[in-house]
Amino acid sequence: MVDTKTITVTVNNEEYTSTVNVRKNLIDYLREDLGLTGSHVGCEHGVCGACTLDMNGQTVRSCLILAVQADGMEITTIEGLPSEGIAEELKKSFAKNNALQCGYCTPGMLSSALEYLNNGGRANKEEIRRHISGNYCRCTGYQAIVEAIYDVAENGVSK
C-alpha cells in the first residue's frame, strides 16, 4: 500500500492541489506531476545544485525535500523567474558573458545568483564564488558565471 497525502503548493504564482506519494521528492513532483522540467535532477544527494530553486524566499535543494514538506509553500522555479528586474538582468548577463554553455547548471545557478543579489550581495568576486560554491558546473570553469553575477551586482539593478 502506497501512502499518499494531498498537498497544496503555489508554484510560479499558480496554486496546485495534488495527491502525492509521501516519499516523492519535490523535484520529481515538479517535473513529473506539474510538467515543470526546467529545474534539473543531478546527483539526487543535494551536492550538485542542479535542482536549486526558491522556496518561501530561500534557495533549497529540491531533491532533498519531500513534496509533502512543501505543502503550503511558495515555490519559484526557473520557469517562474520574472522577466524584469534583477532576474531578467541576470539572464541577459549570463548570455552576454557566455555563462550558459550546456545549460544544465543554469537554473540552479540563476536561483543562487538571484538569492545572492536579492539579499544585498555586492560586486565582490570572492563573495560571489563562495555563494555559488554549492552549484557544480563542468563546462564554464565558473569564471564566466562569476563575471555575469558581478556585472549585475556592479550595475545595481533594482528588484
Image (tube, rainbow, N blue to C red):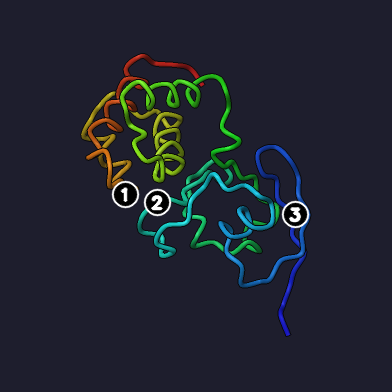
Q: Residue furthest top?
A: 155
How dense is the environment of label 2, judged by Cα within 10 Å: few (below 14), some, or many (20 and up)? many
Front position in the image: 61 or 27: 27
Q: Is residue 122 above or below residue 107?
A: above
Residue 22 position in % (x across, y down): 66, 71
Q: Earlier in the sequence, mark 1 or mark 2?
A: 2
Position of residue 35 measured from the top left corner of the image (x, y, whole percent):
66, 50
Going from N to C along the chain, the mark reached first, 2 or 3, is 3
Picture coordinates of residue 133, whole percent (x, y): 29, 46
Q: Quadrant of residue 66?
A: bottom right
Q: Residue at x 70, y 37 (%)?
A: 13
Give the mark toward the camera: 2 or 3.
2
Amino acid type of disc 1? Tyr
In this orientation, which residue lies closer to the viewer: 31 or 22?
A: 31
Residue 49, numbered label: 2
As drawn, the label of residue 8 is 3
State the residue position of label 1: 136
Where residue 69 sits, quadrant-wise, is bottom right
- How many neighbours does mark 3 have within 10 angstroms: few (below 14), some (14-19), or many (20 or more)? some
State the separation of the CA atoms marked 1 and 2: 6 Å
**Given contact means CB atoms under 8 Å apart, are the residues at marks 1 and 2 in contact?**
yes
Q: Residue at x 58, y 44 (%)?
A: 56
19 left or right, relative to 11: right
**SS assignment at label 3:** strand
- Disc nearer the start of the sequence (1/3): 3
Query: Relative to 122, is 127 above or below?
Result: below
Q: Nearer the viewer, residue 92 or 19?
A: 92
Residue type, numbered disc 3: Thr
**Image quadrant where one finds the N terminus:** bottom right
